[in-house]
């Protein structure tokens, strides 16, 4: 079972339909959606593999509603209730790019989780947002260590350059080096900022994550997969018809990739020294190629809908 630990919040998504005019009205369409990177990954993965979400929401109607919505996707939802539920205002420009104004609220208040919440997990995914704030930061690290010690695999998502700058570049790299996740997802700017992939080649900090496969997304351009001990290779992104809102696209990619990753482990695919199915030598790359391809297909489904949603939601 895939576990995902992190934020479950309300997204207030604003599609700006004209220029923002300071001090007066600007035309827009406003949508309220379930948000939080971790919750989005769980929702998108639920139709592909068994998945459990671990997090904290407010002791309020908003938190209860968000947890029920997530459970409605087939997610096994384990949440604590304290404080007030968080919200994020997401401004979307005409090109679909996002500007986010987060108030994470109760998402930062998750305390160390009971063993029952981790029982049965074969993989735990944690967005880097979950390291920012306490006690959730300590909880995330503790959960990752416990899943690894039980024989599971783990993954991190670099989340955003803004978050990384606030958290500290060296602090994040040192933490990732210590945790040694099986997979690290990042977009091109995040990967370059961390010094992991620069201009398509391993960057100056890449050797610090010697046991981690780094997956670098690049929008409409090819995704680069860098397996330890192997030459990086790319997986092309199929063209999509419409891009109106990029919110949740990276989460959907991670969901599809991880579901394929777990499928490969269940079917006994060849595994590299890094613990990555289908990555051992040239003959193994189809496993990771298919994982990225499934991630691309998942991401393509959300690009024309508001927030982290699909047309069928």
Image (spheres, rainbow, N blue to C red):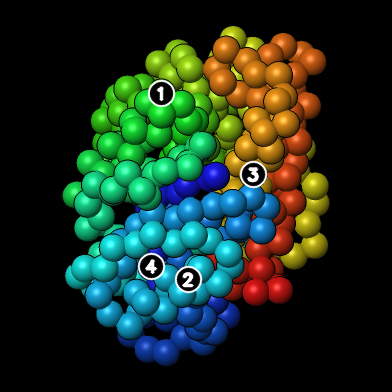
Q: Earlier in the sequence, mark 1 or mark 2?
A: 2
Q: Earlier in the sequence, mark 2 or mark 4?
A: 4
Indicate the position of residue 126 as horizontal and vertical percent values.
Answer: 42, 43
Distance between the Cα atoms at labels 2 and 4? 6 Å
Instruction: Identify the mark at residue 34; answer none if there is no mark.
Output: 2
Q: Earlier in the sequence, mark 1 or mark 4?
A: 4
Contact between labelled residues 4 and 2, with CB atoms less than 8 Å apart: no
Q: Earlier in the sequence, mark 3 or mark 1?
A: 1
Distance between the Cα atoms at labels 3 and 1? 20 Å
Q: Earlier in the sequence, mark 3 or mark 4?
A: 4
The residue singled out by tag 4 in the image is: 9
Please tell me which residue is depicted at 80% across the width and 47% down the height of the picture: 238
Please tell me which residue is depicted at 39% across the width and 54% down the height of the picture: 54
Looking at the image, can residue 242 be seen? yes
Indicate the position of residue 45 as horizontal and vertical percent values.
Answer: 61, 53
The residue singled out by tag 1 in the image is: 180
As helix, strand or loop, the secondary structure at mark 1 comes to loop
The residue singled out by tag 3 in the image is: 259
**For discs 2 and 3, the disc positioned in front in the rendered view:** 3
Please tell me which residue is depicted at 28% across the width and 63% down the height of the picture: 80
Other-residue count near label 1 (Cα within 10 Å), few / some / many at <14 / 14–19 / ≥20: many
């Amino acid at each position: 079972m895939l576990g995902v630990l992190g934020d479950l919040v309300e997204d207030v998504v604003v599609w700006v339909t004209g220029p923002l005019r300071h001090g007066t009205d600007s035309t827009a369409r406003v949508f309220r959606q379930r948000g939080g990177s971790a919750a989005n990954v769980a929702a998108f993965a639920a139709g592909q593999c068994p998945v459990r979400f671990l997090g904290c929401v407010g002791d309020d109607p908003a938190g209860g509603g968000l947890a029920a919505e997530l459970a409605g996707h087939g997610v096994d939802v384990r949440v604590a209730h304290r404080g007030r539920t968080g919200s994020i205002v997401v401004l979307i420009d005409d090109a679909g790019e996002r500007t986010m104004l987060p108030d994470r609220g109760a998402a930062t208040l998750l305390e160390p989780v009971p063993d029952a919440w981790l029982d049965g997990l074969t993989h735990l995914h944690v967005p880097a947002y979950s390291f920012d704030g306490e006690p959730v930061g300590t909880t995330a690290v503790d959960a990752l260590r416990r899943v690894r010690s039980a024989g599971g695999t783990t993954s991190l998502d670099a989340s955003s350059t803004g978050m990384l700058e606030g958290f500290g570049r060296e602090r994040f790299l040192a933490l990732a080096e210590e945790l040694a996740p099986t997979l690290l997802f990042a977009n091109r700017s995040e990967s370059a900022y961390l010094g992991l992939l620069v201009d398509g080649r391993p960057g100056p900090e890449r050797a610090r994550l010697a046991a981690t496969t780094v997956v670098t997304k690049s929008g409409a351009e090819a995704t680069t997969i860098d397996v330890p001990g192997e030459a990086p290779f790319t997986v092309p992104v199929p063209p999509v018809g419409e891009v109106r809102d990029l919110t949740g696209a990276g989460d959907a990619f991670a969901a599809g990739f991880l579901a394929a990753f777990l499928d490969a482990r269940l079917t006994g695919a060849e595994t590299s020294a890094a613990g990555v199915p289908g990555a051992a030598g040239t003959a193994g790359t189809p496993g990771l190629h298919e994982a990225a391809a499934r991630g691309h297909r998942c991401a393509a489904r959300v690009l024309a809908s508001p927030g982290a949603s699909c047309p069928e939601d």
